[in-house]
Image (cartoon, helix red, strand yellow):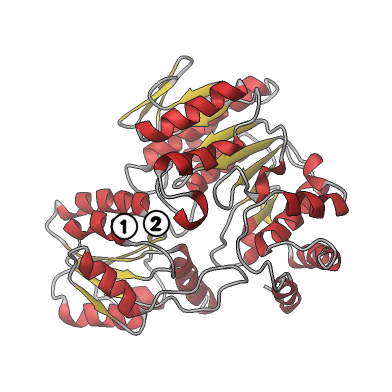
Amino acid sequence: MSDIVEGFLRRLHHPVLAGIDLSLDRMLRLLSVLGNPHKRLPPVVHVAGTNGKGSLIIYLQSILEAAGYRVHRYTSPHLVHFRERMILAGQPIDDPYLAKLLAHVATVLPGSPATFFEATTAVAFLAFSERKADVLLLETGMGGRLDATNVVEKPLLTAITPVDIDHTEYLGTTLTAIAGEKAGIIKRGVPCVVGRQQAEAMAVLEAKAASMGAPLSRLGSEWQVEGNIYRSATQELVMKPSLVGNFQLDNAATAIACIEKIVERMPQFNISAEHIATGLGHAVWPGRLQPLKTGKFAKLLPEGFELWLDGGHNAQGGKVLAQWLAEKKTTGVSVHLVCGMVAGKDSTAYFQHIAPYADKLYGIAISGTPYTGEPQSKTAEQVAASAKAAGLDAVSMPSAENALQTIAQHVKKPAIVVICGSLYLVRSILQAMNKEGTL
């Protein structure tokens, strides 16, 4: 990232609105000053949920591009470069154009103050409105009802991935309350695709959809997942997703259900079963059960050891990681976790899910400086204490490198090692690999 872009990102800071303050009023005022770019977007697929949003969007992008369509994409947080958040027709926004838009938004912020996420989302809307594409895949930052992205009045489609307990300080402490916030993206008369849900969350989503006259397409009702088979009223497909873990079959199936609705809403789109298979098989999404086979971290472990990177960070993320570790443990291999968490995150449920499958956990602090509004790291001692409380054998370590060196010295047989716990930890690992040229 250029120094100019970095400088403007640091400037998008308001002394009062430094963090997260869920509201649409400020966002709408800012967009009005900027000429309402959110009203000049390509057809929008708006995605909310607690887990699986990124994977769903990546599958959709890969399928649509396999069919020859130009795709804009908005996701957060980024892992290595801020430009990853804004994909324009398949390519990350370039630094000169990003700097130009950041400078423009920065000039209006004194009169229309906004949080960091609101300001950068406004930048994204400007870019998406000025560059041509066939579809915009738009991910909520958090929640849905009052998320800065929820100013899009009439999306082509909405989608809600599994809802679970997370961000309780902003979204509520119960599954019902959180599902209500996620349901806020459902728009009147606009179809909504719904992934696997707990019954309590599904009831909230169904009630909201009924009140808005929004047709639902739900896993378990309008479409099914049986092993690696996707089945709906119109087709049956064998899924072979590129991303690792059985849970990715649900994400891939949700993407297929979305594609069916996109084609239904826009019959001019020509997307075949072959396009779907190609898209699912070529999707790439770093930091989600990603194997690390090269670079300085992989080199710290002896031959035969497997090193993985995973950014799942809440209860559902722990459940998903636990399911994958359970498969690995059937071979008798030992599992060692190098874990970092952000401050304010209740990590109890995350650790409880993975505790039965981990032989040892090494708590570390997340290195690097967060952007404005992003959370600080828990200390290594705090991470280890939380893990111990959940029944894990845990110690604190100065860094990921120290943890991997300790594993290499004391674990005598090939093992599974997972660096996990937060997307911000994943970012720091990938940034370090990028600097050494091994990413």
Residue at 83 percent across and 68 percent down: it is 110
Residue at 46 percent across and 18 percent down: it is 235
Horizontally, is 282 left or right of 138 in the view? left
Q: Nearer the viewer, residue 373 or 326?
A: 373
Q: Secondary structure at mark 2?
A: loop
> Given the image, on which type of amino acid does mark 1 rest?
Tyr
Please say if 150 is above or below 381: above
Horizontally, is 332 left or right of 223 in the view? left
> Given the image, on which type of amino acid does mark 2 rest?
Gly
Please say if 64 is above or below 97: above
Q: Is residue 257 visible?
A: no
Please state the horizontal and vertical placement of residue 304, each as a whole percent of the image.
22, 68
Please state the horizontal and vertical placement of residue 396, each as a whole percent of the image.
28, 80
How many numbered discs? 2
Give the spatial CA distance, label 1 vs label 2.
9 Å
Say which quadrant the N terminus sits in. bottom right
Q: Nearer the viewer, residue 172 or 324?
A: 172
Please state the horizontal and vertical placement of residue 300, each as a whole percent of the image.
31, 79
For label 2, the residue is: 312
Q: Is residue 327 visible?
A: yes
Q: Nearer the viewer, mark 1 or mark 2?
A: 1
Q: Secondary structure at mark 1?
A: helix
The image quadrant that residue 134 belongs to is top right
Please say if 27 is above or below 226: below
Please state the horizontal and vertical placement of residue 164, each as a whole percent of the image.
40, 45
Q: Pointer 1 and pointer 2: residues touching (CB < 8 Å)?
A: yes
Compare marks 1 and 2 and give the one earlier in the sequence.
2
For label 1, the residue is: 350
The image quadrant that residue 124 belongs to is bottom right
**Label 2: how many residues lie within 10 Å, few (<14), some (14-19) or many (20+)?**
many
